[in-house]
Amino acid sequence: MLGISGMAAMTIISPSAFARSEVEVRGVSLHEVGGKTRVVFDLSGPVQHSIFTLSHPDRVVIDFDNARAAGALSVRPTPLVADIRHAVRDRSDLRVVLDLKADADASSFLVHPGQGARHYQVVVDLASVSVGQPEPVITAAQAQPQRALRDVVVCIDPGHGGKDPGAIGKRGTYEKTVVLDMAHRLHRLINKEPGMSAFMTRTGDYFVTLRGRLVKARQRRADLFVSIHADASPYRYPKGSTVYVLSEHGASSEAARLLAERQNSVDRVAGVNLSNKDNLVASVLVDLAQSATREASFTLGDTLKGSIDRVIRMHSNTVERAAFVVLKSPDIPSALIETAFISNPAEERLLRTPRFRSEMAGALLGGIKDYFAHHAPPGTVLAERGRVLSEFS
Ligand SMILES: [Zn+2]
């Protein structure tokens, strides 16, 4: 049984141990986007922080561990935020208080350099919870984007690794080796694209658990997850490429598990802030967000299939559904590609050629770009470009 109180504090735990040295909060800025307020703290390094809300009067409190303010933090008042105050707490911590003009939901996350920012940032999103209140009037000056647009982030997942070689071809070709090479090629291609950046769940020949791959995607706030594999069959004849997305059953059981675990992790599942929702409401919200993710995954699968089809014949002409663990992120559109059959002698030969691996990487990039052309998340360079293009067309 999960007890979620009305005022739940959440602590964001970083994967790695934080450096002991003090982090400086160098500045703060406020951005009004679509009726929401985004508060961005610029930091000298990664920081552990926690956030909670208080009412009468309405406030948001952000505690930064082992941190100090580099100077006086100040903001210009907005329709939601009246003022900002800060003080040293427990001698080495920094407490920042945002005084609000109305009750608001608050959520936060840490941005790493390269994820659309040049340095570490803690981003706090505030959404007014009062119902039926008119949208705050945003003046032209406030609407001018000081907001930094970020890159879309693609998590590339080369299958297997280390003690797990994956499938092995007749000529001794290891799946883990050829998929890693394709992943490196795709990684380079994506990072050359304006508005896009990529990272890999493994960059060498070592073992990463399936769950660990999901955690990496989540921690780095991937917008998309693409897992690369090579297929195998007990028979030599099957050939071609297959694209998989998560089956419905796999999705719902994973949501239940994540819901159960949420108090141990970030209080956010599938983009839904669960900190002040009861269990029933939370599970309904997660369900909704998840079916949207499933739909997006299917779209991604479709654009990938369309692009791969130009490089190699598809083994299956539809996007297949399966309950692969690595596809189970409830809030990250995900697809798994069996690039070719390593058990088919002709395709094993193909997989061994740098040319094919390069063409496959190009095809995956093409499918990913096709997807983002219509589905880039708001606040990204690609979404903004799409918006500007459609406004002027
Ligand atoms: Zn595999």
Image (cartoon, rainbow, N blue to C red):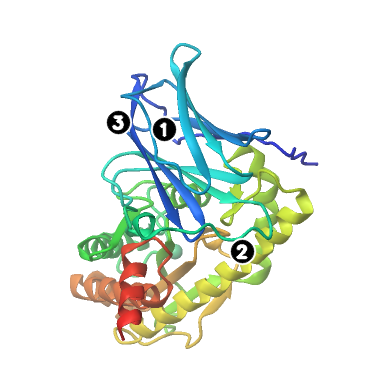
The N terminus, quarter of image: top right
- Residue at the spot of label 3: 44
In the rendered image, the vertical position of residue 76 relative to residue 182, given as above or below: above
Q: Quadrant of residue 88?
A: top left
Front of the two marks 1 and 2: 2
Camera-side residue: 330 or 139?
139
- Residue at the spot of label 2: 289
The C terminus, quarter of image: bottom left
Front of the two marks 2 and 3: 3
Q: Is residue 355 visible?
A: yes
Specify few, some or many for label 1: CA neighbours under 10 Å numbering under 14, 14-19, or 20 or more: few
Camera-side residue: 300 or 245?
300
Instruction: Determine the residue positioned at 26% across, 64% down.
Output: 190
Q: Secondary structure at mark 3?
A: loop
Q: Quadrant of residue 392?
A: bottom left
Which circle's residue, 1 or 2, is located before the other in the chain? 1
Camera-side residue: 271 or 59?
59
Instruction: Determine the residue positioned at 33% across, 50% down.
Output: 115
Split into quadrants, the picture shows ligand 1 in the one at bottom left
Mark 2–mark 3 CB contact (< 8 Å): no
Q: Is residue 343 visible?
A: no
Q: Quadrant of residue 256?
A: bottom right
Camera-side residue: 339 or 36?
36
Specify few, some or many for label 2: CA neighbours under 10 Å numbering under 14, 14-19, or 20 or more: some
- The residue under label 3 is which amino acid type? Ser
Which circle's residue, 3 or 1, is located before the other in the chain? 1
- Residue at the spot of label 1: 16
Q: Position of residue 182 (x, y in %)?
A: 28, 65
- The residue under label 1 is which amino acid type? Ser
